[in-house]
């Protein structure tokens, strides 16, 4: 069998390393031949122009005759785009496979864990960094793995090796370091990825001591000199003495497919030495992508930065012309005929008497700073062109355009800029959803030992929560609440807060400030949501014949109406134990309405069901109170049962179904 008859990813451990290195070298050559390397290099130098020029003007030209000054609208507009997309904190909504209370409680824990990883594990920073790479280079990547070297020590082997419980490792990957098959028509079609990492040699040696010689003899990639030169723009430390402590590590990931049913993970060095080889333990590839726009028929992303480059080039030419003229001829030169008797000393300072010989012309200043007016006219044109192509308007830059003074009008212009970046926005939220779902799957699969996370609960109060992967085992996926684009800008949140205030949803200054600063509406309905979750839990207990307790602060009318649905099941009506618990629980809510302090019920927005006391009537100023006429007491006892509020004495033997019908059909004052 020839070597070509074997799928390269199915090669043996001895051969797979060379196959991976060959595909890395092919990718490097593709970057150069396709022009991506030249494009990325230019994008890199323009976006980080302050670093390239060391924050000062600079000389350039064949004889350094030109003076340059970077006015970087390019970076400014790209940063505005990034801020529009990333300025709102992700709002994760874990979804459980079932709707029972246990599964719903797991969604609350999963949401808290995701918040913990956003805050403590810097997941949000990785999201932002991937978005930044996408706006500049067209695509940014995120690598998420389970790392057994992280976490706390929970066991020590006889050899003295510490065993840690592991944790999720998250890393942002530059498109230069994400190798894929360039022949595919879209990125999702790819079966494999290779991540190029500059890894600490000694850390790697501690992890794989059996490959001591291979790791110590390993080196930083040198096969592609242009790739190495490009990388210098990203790494401040490039000295050889520091480089000796690092090696280039290639992580090969192959998805599960018919050609490779178990998938594969391989870690190899520059020379093809394989130090790790295993089946893929994950449900999918651990690489996640954010792209500004897809380039149809190719796996590359396309960004507006590509279109802004030539405009910034032209703008730089105009600015450099002005700076060169000012720097070279900013101080006026004086023309005087030879032999006029003038010298430099006579022209210095002010209030000088300048004399020339009779018949000689007067000295004249030379106007060498003249710049054609077309240069000045071109400057705003190029600036406006960059704004137009990037979709950034004056509102996003913090300026009020002429004729627009209302908050709603400013919010509309801001939302239009966000909608212009809709492609990047959708990809960014897709990155968050996919990686958050994968993070939950990693915890479900590998978090076997108990661990503690610092969860932020209601009102931003932190609390420690011990959990294992099984505690969130029912979570199937995670979605991201995109929300209203207007809520991403201050003017939009102000308009939203005013609308909610006028509609009566905002009832306190704290709620108004929260909507204004965050744009989140969850605090306005969080209490009602928790009450409904409580009712659902109580309904489950009632179907088991368990009577849950009743608190005076419950929303009693809502509880009664929702608990009534338990008895709507014909099978449950035939169960006296369940009907007894249901009847007693509903009666407890009625008793609470009758006996609770009216002031408390008023604060809760409820009305007391206690019988109303007759109002006193003043008879002619005598000070006596005579009750209004009404039926005698013996007639009250003869009233129809449905006209009175039912009461159930504790412990009284009753027919469960009949008692429930009496309560459910009787009038409830609310």
Image (cartoon, grey):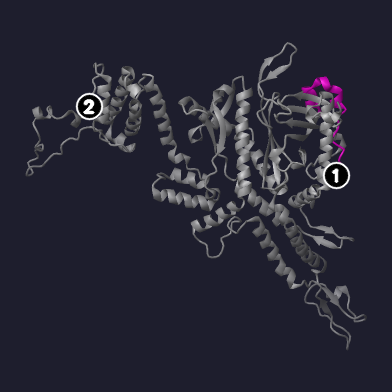
Q: Which residue is mark 2?
A: 646
Judge whether 516 appears above or below 73 on screen. above
Q: Residues within 10 Å of mark 1 (few under 14, many from 20)?
A: some
Could you tell me which quadrant the N terminus lies in?
Answer: top right
On whether residue 212 falls in the magenta region, the answer is yes
Label 2 secondary element: loop
Q: How many marks?
A: 2
Q: Classify residue 110 by image quadrant.
A: top right
Rendered residue at 86%/28% (across/down): 2
In the rendered image, the residue lying farthest to the front is 1
In the figure, 556 relative to 51: above or below?
A: above
Q: Is residue 163 left or right of residue 227?
A: left
* SS at mark 1 in the image: helix
Dividing the picture into quadrants, the one containing residue 121 is top right
- Find residue 226 and name its label: 1
Secondary structure mainly formed by the magenta segment: helix
Above-or-below relation of 141 to 324: above
Percent x, y of residue 625: 10, 38
Between 287 and 283, which is closer to the camera in this rendering?
Answer: 283
């Amino acid at each position: 069998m020839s070597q070509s008859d074997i799928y390269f990813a199915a090669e043996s451990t001895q051969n797979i390393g060379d196959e991976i290195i060959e595909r890395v070298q092919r990718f490097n050559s593709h970057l150069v031949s396709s022009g991506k390397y030249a494009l990325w290099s230019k994008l890199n130098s323009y976006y980080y122009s302050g670093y390239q020029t060391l924050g000062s003007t600079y000389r350039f030209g064949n004889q350094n005759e030109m003076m340059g000054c970077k006015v970087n609208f390019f970076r400014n507009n790209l940063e505005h785009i990034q801020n529009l997309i990333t300025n709102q904190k992700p709002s994760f909504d874990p979804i459980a496979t079932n709707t029972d209370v246990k599964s719903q409680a797991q969604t609350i824990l999963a949401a808290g864990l995701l918040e913990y990883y956003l805050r403590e594990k810097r997941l949000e920073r990785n999201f932002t960094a991937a978005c930044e790479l996408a706006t500049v280079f067209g695509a940014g990547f995120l690598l998420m793995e389970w790392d057994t070297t992280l976490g706390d020590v929970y066991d020590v082997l006889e050899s003295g090796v510490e065993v840690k419980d592991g944790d999720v490792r998250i890393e942002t990957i530059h498109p230069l370091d994400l190798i894929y098959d360039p022949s595919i028509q879209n990125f999702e079609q790819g079966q494999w990825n290779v991540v190029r990492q500059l890894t600490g040699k000694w850390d790697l040696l501690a992890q794989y001591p059996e490959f001591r010689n291979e790791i110590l003899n390993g080196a930083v990639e040198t096969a592609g000199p242009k790739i190495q030169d490009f990388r210098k723009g990203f790494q401040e430390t490039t000295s050889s003495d520091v480089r000796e402590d690092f090696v280039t590590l290639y992580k090969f990931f192959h998805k599960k497919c018919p050609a490779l049913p178990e998938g594969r993970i391989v870690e190899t060095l520059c020379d093809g030495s394989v130090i790790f080889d295993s089946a893929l333990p994950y449900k999918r590839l651990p690489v996640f992508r954010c792209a500004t726009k897809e380039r149809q028929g190719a796996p590359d992303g396309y960004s507006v930065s590509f279109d802004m480059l030539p405009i910034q080039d032209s703008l730089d030419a105009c600015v450099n012309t002005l700076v060169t003229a000012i720097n070279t001829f900013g101080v006026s030169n004086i023309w005087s005929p030879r032999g006029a008797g003038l010298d430099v000393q006579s022209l210095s300072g002010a209030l000088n008497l300048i004399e020339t010989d009779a018949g000689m012309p007067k000295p004249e200043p030379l106007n060498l700073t003249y710049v054609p007016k077309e240069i000045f006219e071109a400057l705003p044109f190029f600036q406006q062109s960059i704004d137009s192509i990037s979709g950034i308007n004056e509102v996003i830059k913090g300026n009020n355009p002429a004729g627009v003074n209302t908050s709603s009008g400013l919010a509309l212009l801001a939302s239009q800029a966000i909608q212009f970046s809709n492609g990047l926005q959708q990809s960014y939220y897709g990155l968050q959803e996919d990686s958050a779902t994968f993070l939950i799957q990693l915890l479900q699969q590998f978090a076997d030992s108990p661990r503690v996370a610092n969860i932020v609960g209601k009102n931003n109060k932190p609390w420690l929560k011990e959990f294992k992967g099984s505690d969130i085992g029912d979570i199937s996926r995670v979605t991201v609440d995109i929300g209203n684009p207007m809520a991403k800008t201050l003017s939009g949140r102000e308009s939203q807060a005013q609308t909610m205030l006028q509609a009566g949803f905002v009832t306190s200054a704290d709620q108004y400030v929260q909507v204004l600063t965050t744009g989140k509406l969850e605090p306005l309905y969080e209490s009602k949501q928790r009450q409904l979750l409580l009712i659902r839990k109580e309904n489950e207990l009632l179907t088991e014949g368990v009577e849950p307790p009743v608190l005076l602060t419950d929303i009693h009318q809502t509880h009664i109406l929702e608990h009534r649905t338990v008895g709507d099941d014909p099978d449950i009506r035939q169960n006296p134990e369940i009907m007894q618990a249901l009847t007693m629980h509903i009666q407890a809510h009625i008793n609470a309405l009758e006996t609770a302090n009216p002031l408390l019920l008023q604060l809760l927005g409820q009305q007391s069901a206690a019988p109303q006391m007759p109002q006193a009537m003043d008879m002619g100023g005598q000070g006596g109170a005579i009750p209004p006429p009404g039926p005698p007491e013996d007639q009250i006892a003869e009233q129809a049962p449905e006209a009175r509020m039912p009461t159930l004495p504790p412990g009284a033997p009753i027919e469960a179904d009949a008692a429930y019908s009496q309560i459910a059909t009787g009038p409830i004052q609310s």
